Image (spheres, rainbow, N blue to C red):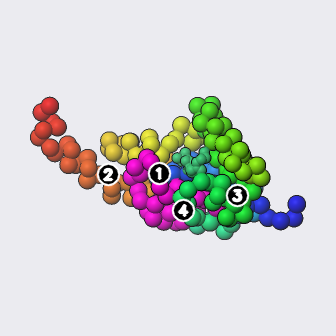
């Protein structure tokens, strides 16, 4: 096959972690073009707006020339078709990821039989890492150095440090 293979790496990325970037790096070596697609309308009530997540991802993926960043809405298979992507890339950290990922992969394949879903494992140092845990650690005053890019850490603190100061300063939360 001489044509370059376009792959889409979709996710909420709320926010990106070094585990996501590890996967981007691996994917960028395997595919001609890798489109990181940030989910626009997540039911998860994201901490960062889609514009913020795209901006952080663009900044963090600047080292890889064949990586593009975009946002999407609606069905992933429709977005992939629009981008002429043949591959959906997802990360598998642990067995616990498998069931949900398998369901999504098989549903996507049912919706579009031309797509291949490719799983890659991040480096072992990132197998326990998730955006949810990163948000929680920062919210509770912990350190996420080495787990997210410095620009993400800065944005997390800018968003969450104020909340923590407010909640610890509140007499009602201290006395109850
Ligand atoms: O980072 P996440 O939250 O695990 O990513 C989930 C994502 C964005 C891959 C998934 O929610 C998705 O593909 N959403 C688009 C809607 C869709 O196509 N659903 C049906 C296929 S499973």
- Residue segment shown in magenta: 35-61
Image quadrant holding the C terminus, namely: top left
Give the vertical position of 85 relative to 43 (above or below).
below
Does the magenta segment cover residue 56? yes
Read off the residue under disc 2: 160
Tag 1–tag 2 contact (CB < 8 Å): no
Marks 1/3: CA distance?
A: 21 Å
Marks 1/4: CA distance?
A: 11 Å
Read off the residue under disc 1: 42
Q: Nearer the viewer, mark 3 or mark 2?
A: 3
Q: Nearer the viewer, mark 1 or mark 3?
A: 1
* Residue 159: quarter of image: bottom left
x and y percent of residue 126 in the render? 57, 42
Tag 1–tag 4 contact (CB < 8 Å): no
Marks 4/3: CA distance?
A: 14 Å
Few, some or many residues within 10 Å of mark 1 (<14, 14–19, 20+): few
Which is more N-terminal, label 2 or label 3? Answer: 3
Read off the residue under disc 3: 7
Read off the residue under disc 4: 71
x and y percent of residue 38 in the render? 54, 57
Residue that appears at 79% across and 64% down: 4
Give the vertical position of 154 relative to 122 (above or below).
below
Side of 74 relative to 157 (left or right): right
């Amino acid at each position: 096959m001489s044509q370059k293979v376009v792959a889409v790496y979709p996710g909420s990325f709320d926010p990106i972690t070094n585990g996501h970037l590890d996967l981007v790096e691996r994917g960028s070596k395997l595919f001609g073009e890798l489109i990181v697609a940030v989910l626009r309308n997540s039911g998860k009530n994201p901490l960062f707006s889609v514009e913020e997540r795209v901006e952080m991802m663009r900044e963090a993926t600047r080292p890889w020339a064949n990586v593009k960043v975009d946002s999407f809405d609606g069905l992933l298979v429709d977005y992939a078709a629009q981008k002429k992507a043949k591959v959906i890339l997802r990360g598998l950290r642990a067995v616990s990821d498998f069931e949900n990922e398998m369901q999504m992969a098989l549903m996507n394949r049912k919706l579009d039989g031309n797509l291949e879903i490719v799983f890659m494992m991040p480096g072992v140092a990132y197998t326990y890492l998730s955006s949810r845990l990163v948000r929680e650690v920062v919210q509770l005053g912990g350190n996420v150095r080495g787990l997210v890019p410095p620009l993400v850490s800065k944005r997390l603190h800018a968003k969450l440090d104020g909340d923590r100061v407010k909640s610890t300063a509140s007499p009602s939360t201290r006395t109850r």
